Amino acid sequence: MAEIDLPLIDVSQFPQELEFEGAHFHNHPEVAKLEEACKEWGFFRVVNHGIEPDLLQKVMSVSRDLLSMPAEVKERVQTYNAVQTYNRSESFYFLDMPNPDLIQQISRKIWPEDGNSNFCETIDKYSLFLSDLQTKITKSILASLGLDPRTFYQCDFEKCKATLFINKYSCDEKCRIGDEALASHADPGCLTILYNDEREGLEIRSKQGKWFNVRPAPDSFIVNLGDSMKAWSNGRYRSADHRVVYRGWMNRISLPFFITPPLDAPDLGSPGARGRE
Ligand SMILES: O=C(O)CCC(=O)C(=O)O
Ligand SMILES: [Fe+2]
């Protein structure tokens, strides 16, 4: 299986002025790199994102605590699933993030004695950081299409919804290297910010239809564009097929943060003639 290192996007290099109205930045070097990555792969890896490695470790650790609870405890949570499409896997999802009340409700169901404030604070802090990161990335994607950052508000990107998943893929002795743990798919929404443990297994399909194994890299996030962003860019940007393949591990944890358009933002849901050709 061919391997790739995803294109690296350094968030600290994005122009600060992206926050201001009326500026155009598609010639900025980091924004140009982003444009290339979105066209070529629809996937990139984000570094210098400002999230402390310590917080990332804590997020993994509280996710493991949650997933290692007995099945009958996990089943108290409505959004706990042994999802069929995730072969031999289980997941929790948290809607409308950041959402401290929901995190507490879920935590109290799992740990009724004390509500596990460490879990709540860690997941809350993490989702606040990720929301901020997704805003920066989305504005930079708009800039890379040659658009004014105000488009973010004019086209209702700020109303997008974020859902955090905590997934665990488990394999037993019957698993064989190359078996699909998550079948090939494209994400339907705007953007996905994915953090996973250092176990290999994520594969993405190139423009030419060839599968590549994504080499893991610590302390960074994988970002991919979904079908809504592809449609919104009038097909200029890819929403690439990807899958998870078993590579010899017993367990693999991944935390996708899905950014999806709200139902009341028709402008975002439909492709328009925007951006430069
Ligand atoms: O677990 C992964 O690395 C990828 C997950 C994914 O693609 C998804 O949940 O849509
Ligand atoms: Fe996906």
Image (tube, grey):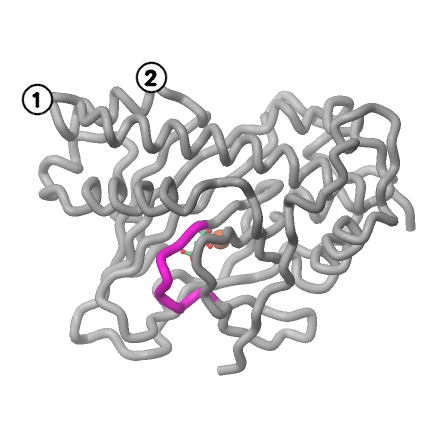
Q: Percent x, y for residue 14?
A: 72, 43
Count numbered badges in the picture.
2
How many residues crowd around disc 1 within 10 Å: few (fewer than 14), some, or many (20 or more)?
Answer: few
Q: Position of residue 104 (x, y in %)?
A: 27, 21
Q: Is residue 193 above or below residue 244?
A: above
Location of residue 246 in the rendering, given as x and y in whole percent from the top left corner:
33, 71
Instruction: Give ligand 1's quarter of the image.
Output: bottom left
For numbered disc 1, what is the local secondary structure?
loop
Residue pointed to by mark 1: 113
Instruction: Name the one closer to the observer, 271 or 118.
Output: 118
Q: Residue at x 43, y 62 (%)?
A: 183
Please name the amino acid that badge 1 sits on.
Answer: Glu
The answer to which quarter of the image holds residue 7 is: bottom right
- Identify the residue shown where x is 30% and y is 39%: 92
- Residue visible at 59% across and 37% down in the picture: 134
Within-10-Å neighbours for mark 2: few <14, some 14–19, many 20+: few
**Residue, x 65% and y 54% (percent of image)?**
9
Work out whether mark 2 precedes mark 1 in sequence or the reverse, and give the earlier one: 2
Q: Which mark is residue 101?
A: 2
Q: Which residues are magenta?
A: 195-202
The magenta stretch spans residue 220? no
Quadrant of residue 247 within the rendered picture: bottom left
The yes-or-no answer for disc 1 within 8 Å of ligand 1 is no
